[in-house]
Image: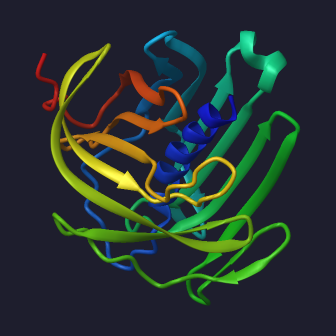
């Protein structure tokens, strides 16, 4: 069960922390708008069992008008929960929130509320871009100044702050593919995000993430191989997109 939820947390964190890139120039945002909400299900997929749903996740750009540091900000909330039937085995109630500048995408505040089985982790992170540091409940760390733009066919780094440390995840771009889900077929861009190795993952690139090849850049499917079968996180619904769903083939 822990592998299901690690995949949920990784995808949500990658989506949320990718907004934490410290870009000093104004950014033209065409991918999303306030009010957008994505819904996912997390399931185990194997030949003998078929698809067994373990939990659900959502990612939402709140419609509220928020201001931080005298600047208008986006407020993005990601949540992951286990199914009631799985709560007795491994109960999960995760919530991540990110507040970042509407114009520059600079992050100002990140909140984490993690409850996974017997593990609990709460944290609040504030970003000071003038002095280049991030402060959490328990630590103070220097943060890098910028992130380079991705070039097709190359790996690119994404620095992010978690558990009082600055990490760098490398994203591998693997080309374009057509992906079929319960919602239909989609033209997608294929990526492999690097994760920390340890109890869950021994391979630093165990996951594959498919994102729609259109202006919305929606995460359609994420999957990770396990001992038998695969753990997947699949988009099941979306509302209030900023653009037409041009990537959908049928």
- In this view, the residue in front, 153 or 133, is 153
Q: Residue at x 53, y 22 (%)?
A: 44
Left or right: residue 190 compared with residue 123 = left
Q: Nearer the viewer, residue 87 or 63?
A: 87
Name the residue furthest bottom. 131
Q: Is residue 101 visible?
A: no
Counting from the top left corner in percent of width and height, residue 216 is at 25, 40
The correct choice, above or below, for 133 with respect to 171 in the image is below
Q: Quadrant of the C terminus?
A: top left
**Image coords of residue 51 (percent x, y):** 48, 13
Task: Tell me if residue 156 comes above or below residue 112 in the rendering.
Answer: below
- Between residue 58 and residue 235, name the one nearer to us: 235
Does 195 appear above or below 92? below
Residue at image point 37% right, 44% down: 208
Q: Going by the picture, which residue comes out furthest to the right?
A: 118
User: As rendered, which of 76 and 234 lies closer to the eye?
Assistant: 234
Q: Which residue shows up at 57% across the image and 56% down it?
A: 99
Q: Quadrant of residue 57?
A: top right
Number of numbered labels in the structure image: 0
**Which picture quadrant has residue 170?**
bottom left
**Residue 133 appearing in the image:** yes
Image: 207 above or below 187? below
* Residue 187 as seen in the image, left or right of residue 119: left
Q: Position of residue 226 (x, y in %)?
A: 53, 35
Which quadrant of the figure has residue 86? top right
Residue 9 location, x and y as percent? Answer: 60, 43
């Amino acid at each position: 069960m822990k592998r299901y939820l690690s995949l949920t947390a990784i995808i949500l964190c990658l989506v949320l922390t990718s907004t934490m890139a410290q870009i000093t120039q104004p950014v033209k945002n065409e991918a999303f708008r306030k009010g957008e909400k994505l819904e996912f299900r997390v399931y185990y997929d194997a030949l003998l069992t078929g698809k067994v749903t373990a939990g659900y996740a959502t990612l939402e750009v709140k419609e509220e008008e928020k201001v931080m540091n005298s600047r208008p900000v986006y407020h993005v909330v990601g949540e992951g929960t286990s199914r009631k039937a799985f709560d007795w085995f491994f109960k999960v109630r995760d919530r991540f929130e990110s507040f970042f500048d509407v114009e520059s995408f600079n992050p100002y505040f990140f909140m984490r509320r993690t409850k996974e089985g017997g593990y609990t982790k709460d944290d609040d992170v504030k970003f000071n871009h003038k002095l280049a540091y991030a402060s959490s409940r328990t630590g103070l760390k220097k943060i890098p100044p910028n992130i380079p733009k991705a070039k097709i066919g190359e790996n690119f780094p994404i620095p992010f702050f978690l558990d009082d440390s600055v990490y760098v995840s490398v994203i591998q771009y693997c080309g374009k593919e057509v992906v079929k889900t319960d919602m239909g077929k989609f033209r997608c861009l294929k990526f492999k995000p690097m994760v920390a190795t340890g109890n869950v993952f021994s391979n630093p690139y165990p996951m594959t993430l498919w994102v729609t090849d259109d202006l919305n850049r929606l995460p359609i499917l994420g999957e990770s191989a396990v001992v038998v079968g695969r753990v997947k996180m699949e988009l099941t619904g979306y509302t209030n997109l900023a653009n037409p769903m041009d990537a959908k083939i049928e």
